[in-house]
Every structure is written in structure tokens, then in C-alpha cells.
Image (tube, helix red, strand yellow):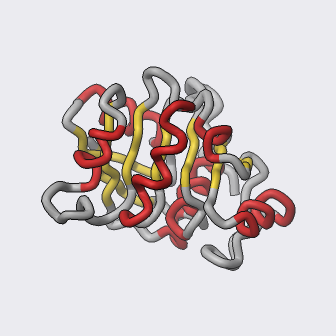
Amino acid sequence: MSVSQPDRKETRIAILGAGNMGTGMAQALALQGRTISIWDHFPEVVREVREKRTNRKFLPDVQLHPDIHAVSDAGECVTGAEIVIVCVPSAFAATTLEPVIAHLEKNAHLVNVAKGFSPDGTEILPKWLGRLTPDHSWSHLAGPALAREFARGLPTFLTIASDSPDAASTVAEALSGKILVPSV
């Protein structure tokens, strides 16, 4: 199933985390005509996505789109990306992000998909992560969204929240298509 939109500007999108939600986001975005770079902590997941076009560990029974490019280096994944989706459990968000900060493009918009709060429980995760990357805008993506559904091409409504209306609009436009339908 292809629902690409060839007339829109190509925005380079990177996804950190090839779990259920990260792989589902990559699949939905690729079905919408995007080329996606994806990285995961587990080398066997990266290898399987790259070589077999599947991710049996996190999203079985979905044949992955050829425009999903799995890479084994997180810095390589985010280099050149205008949108970086951080799609790892909240407990690992900071340790995933810290090594790639030097590789982020100057105006990259960062998107948090993880549920949860800062380790001390006092702040929502995007605000806490924002201190790690003060030169970048953060948005938060919320559902309800089921990765298994939108990975199969079913339309899904998403909410994008941010302190920056411009960042939220940029992220919503980059993710928008016939499958992912974001609202700011």
C-alpha cells in the first residue's frame, strides 16, 4: 500500500528507537512517501530491519517499506535530519540522546514520543530533555495511536504539543499524510 505525496517538500526525518512505536512511525511515514533513517540500541534489530525488511521483535507480521534505512550508529542516523523523533522508553531517553547531541543539525526539531516524566518525577519528559538540548525545540506527540494499526496504513489522529507554535506546526506538517493526521 502506498499513499505517498510526491508534491511536498522532502523533510529528512530520523527516528531513534526501532521498538513498536518507532518502527510503526517509520513504516507509516515511509508509506506516506518519506525516506526515514532509524536506529536502535539492539544491533540485531537494526540488522533485521536492514536485511530482511522486518522487525519480528517489536512489530511482527509487518513487511517494512524499502524507504526505511536502518543504521547502526545513532549519530549517523540524526545527521542531516530536520526532525528527530525520540522513540525510546522514557528511562532511556537521556542516555539515547546525549551521544547524538553533537550530530544534531542546528535547527533540528526534536519530538518526544515516550510517555513519562523526568527521573525525579517533577517534569514532563520533553521539558526535561529540553535542558539537554537548549538550542533545539521540543514537541511531544500523543495519541491515541496504536503502532500496529498505523504501520498497516490505517489513519491515526495525533496531537503535537510544544512551547513553540512554530515547532509544533513544522513537526505536524512533516508528519502529516493520509495515515498520520497530526493536530497542533
Residue name at image x 40 percent, y 53 percent: 94
Q: Position of residue 184 (x, y in %)?
A: 26, 41
State whether residue 3 appears in this view: no
Q: Position of residue 25 (x, y in %)?
A: 53, 56
Q: Is residue 72 left or right of residue 168?
A: right
> In the image as oriented, which residue stretches furthest toward the top?
106
Residue name at image x 56 percent, y 67 percent: 19
Q: 139 or 93: which is nearer to us?
A: 93
Classify residue 55 by image quadrant. Answer: bottom right
Q: 111 or 66: which is nearer to us?
A: 111
> In the image as oriented, which residue stretches furthest toward the left?
122
Q: Is residue 47 above or below residue 55?
A: above
Residue name at image x 56 percent, y 29 percent: 11
Label count reads 0
| Image quadrant containing the N terminus | bottom right
State whether residue 44 appears in this view: yes
Q: Is residue 119 above or below residue 13?
A: below
Q: Is residue 99 above or below residue 94?
A: above
Q: Position of residue 174 (x, y in %)?
A: 47, 35
Q: Is residue 156 left or right of residue 63?
A: left
Q: Is residue 86 above or below residue 77?
A: below
Classify residue 56 by image quadrant. Answer: bottom right
Residue name at image x 21 percent, y 55 percent: 124
Classify residue 58 by image quadrant. Answer: bottom right
Q: Position of residue 32 (x, y in %)?
A: 60, 46
Q: Is residue 159 left or right of residue 28?
A: left
> In the image as oriented, which residue stretches furthest toward the right?
51
Q: Is residue 97 left or right of residue 58?
A: left
